[in-house]
Amino acid sequence: DLHRRRHSFPTRRSSDLTDPDFRRGPRGNLRLVTSLDAIADGRRLHVPAGFLTDGASIPPLMWPVVGHPYSPSSLRAAILHDWLCRNPDAHAMPSPAVHRLFYASLRADGVAWLRAWAMWLAVRVFGPRF
């Protein structure tokens, strides 16, 4: 299963990531205490310490279906996605590619395909475009 997961979604593997360390920030957000690093499509992506995230932007009504915004299974993907969306000039990836990376990151971290697809669809429809 691990072998299949790693090779089905080559944009990012769980082993390519550091685990984020964070503290509560203002308004319930999380502030990264340590940086988060990932390798995606052959690029090294770096989310610096101090970055504020709201986790996965999931409306409370959808929490029973999709999960909590700070769910460990989706938190790394959400942090990376937030950083990429807020800093589009830092990576030269168009928004559809960033959203696909979010899906691939969720799958690489073990999120079931249907939940990952629903989360991808939400960011594709309601997320930023750049």
Image (cartoon, rainbow, N blue to C red):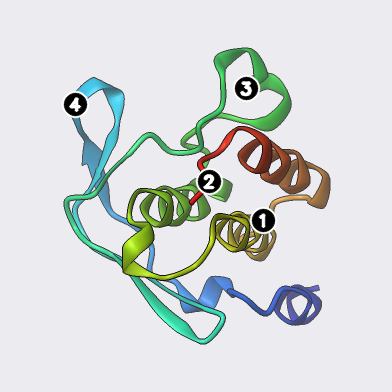
Question: Which residue bears the numbered disc 3?
Answer: 63
Tell which circle, 2 or 3, labels the residue nearer the N-terminal end: 3
| In the displayed structure image, the side of residue 85 where residue 96 appears, left or right | right
Q: Position of residue 12 (x, y in %)?
A: 58, 74
| In the displayed structure image, the side of residue 22 where residue 44 appears, left or right | right
Q: In what element is the residue under mark 2?
A: loop
Amino acid on which disc 2 is placed: Arg
Q: In what element is the residue under mark 4?
A: helix
Q: Residues within 10 Å of mark 1 (few under 14, many from 20)?
A: many
Tell which circle, 3 or 1, labels the residue nearer the N-terminal end: 3
Tell which circle, 1 or 4, labels the residue nearer the N-terminal end: 4
Query: Going 43% across and 57% down the picture, which residue do you hit?
Result: 80
State how many labels appear: 4
| In the displayed structure image, the side of residue 43 where residue 3 appears, left or right | right
Q: In what element is the residue under mark 3?
A: helix
Comparing labels 1 and 2, the label whose residue is closer to the camera: 2
Which residue extends farthest bottom?
42
Amino acid on which disc 4 is placed: Pro
Q: Position of residue 93 (x, y in %)?
A: 49, 67
Q: Residues within 10 Å of mark 3 (few under 14, many from 20)?
A: few
Question: Which residue bears the numbered disc 4?
Answer: 26
The quadrant of the image that shows the N terminus is bottom right
Q: Name the foreground residue: 112 vs 82.
A: 82
Q: Position of residue 31 (x, y in %)?
A: 23, 43
Tell which circle, 2 or 4, labels the residue nearer the N-terminal end: 4
